[in-house]
Amino acid sequence: MGVDCFVTAFLAMTLPASYSQHPTSNFLPSTSYCLLPTNSMKFSPNSRGIIRLPFVEYGRSVLGTPLRYIPCRGKCRLLVMAGIHGEEPETTFLLSRALRAFSEPFDDISFILCANPDGMALGTRGNANGVDLNRNFKTQNFSAEMVGSRSILEASRDTLLSPGTFAESEPETRALVTLVEKLRPSSVLAMHAPMGCIDAPRKTAIVESLMNAFNLTWLPDIGYKTLGSFGTWCGERGLECVTLELPRMSLEHLFDRYGMAFADFLERMALR
Ligand SMILES: [Zn+2]
C-alpha cells in the first residue's frame, strides 16, 4: 500500500459513520482507492495548468463581472454549463480540468465554465442579489415565493433564497437565455453537485454516455419541484437538458476519478 492509499484508507476509516449511511454515499472513497497520477497523464505538464481555448463575453453579472463562454467553431450542438450555483465550485473545477486536455475549440460543443461568477466568488448558492439563478427562468411554473435549499445534503431545506422578484430579473439569467437562444443547441448539459446522479426526463444517448463515464444512476425525475429552473425552461422549448449531479467528493478525488472520463466523454460527444 502506497502512502496515498494509506492516507485514503485512513480517511475512509475516520469519516463520520453518517457519511456511509447516506443513500448517495457513492462519493465515499473506498479503502482500495488510491490517488494515482495515471489519470492525469493525458494532461501534459505544460498544458495541465491553463485552459487554451478562447473565451467570449456574453454579458455581465450583477457586480459587473464578465460572463464568458467558450464558443465552438461551427453550429453548436451541445452546450455544457457549470457553476450556476456558487456553492458548487466542483462543477467549474472538473469542467476546467477536463478542458485542459484540449488545445483547439470543439466544432460543435460550447462551454460555460461559470454561469454565476459572483456567487462563486462569494461562496453563495445565489448571485450577488441573493437570487437562486436556477429558479429565475421564465417558465410556466415560475413563482416569486422564497425557495428552500439544503446547507448540506442530509439537512432539511434550512436555507431560503429568492427566485427573483420576477422571472429573468437577474442579468446572469437574461444573458444565459440570450446566449442559448443565439446558439440554439440541441442539448444542454447542466452541471450541479453533490447528489451523485444524472437527472433527465429521457434516457438519451448523452445520458447513457454520461452513465458510463461517471458510473452514476439515471433519474427521470429528481423528486422535488424546481419551479423556474433552467431545466424546466429548456423542456418547455423542446431543448434537451441533462443535469449531471456530481457526487460529493473532494476536488482532487473528482479529478482523479472523473477528469479523464469527462474529457473522453466530451471527445465522444464531439465525434458523434
Ligand atoms: Zn446546483
Image: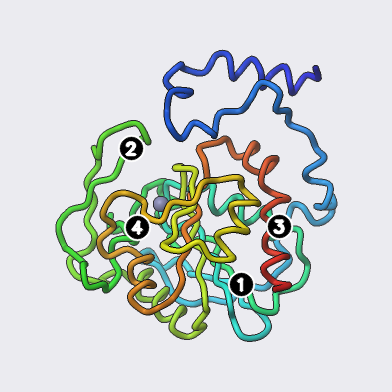
Q: In the rendering, at what x and y percent does residue 245 appear?
A: 48, 49
Q: Going from the N terminus, do you reach mark 2 or mark 1 first?
A: 1
Of the two numbered discs 3 and 4 in the rendering, the one whose residue sits closer to the viewer: 3
Q: In the rendering, at what x and y percent does residue 227 appear?
A: 25, 61
Q: In the rendering, at what x and y percent does residue 13 appear?
A: 58, 14
- Residue type at mark 1 is Ile
- Residue type at mark 2 is Ser
Colouring used for the render: rainbow
Q: Residues within 10 Å of mark 4 (few under 14, many from 20)?
A: many
Q: Going from the N terminus, do you reach mark 3 or mark 2 first?
A: 2
The numbered dot on residue 70 is: 1
Of the two numbered discs 3 and 2 in the rendering, the one whose residue sits closer to the viewer: 3
Q: Quadrant of residue 253?
A: top right
Query: Residue beneath label 2, please?
Result: 151
In the image, what residue occupies the spot 45% across and 67% down? 241
- Residue type at mark 4 is Asn
Query: Residue beneath label 4, please?
Result: 127
Q: Residues within 10 Å of mark 2 (few under 14, many from 20)?
A: some
Q: Residues within 10 Å of mark 1 (few under 14, many from 20)?
A: many
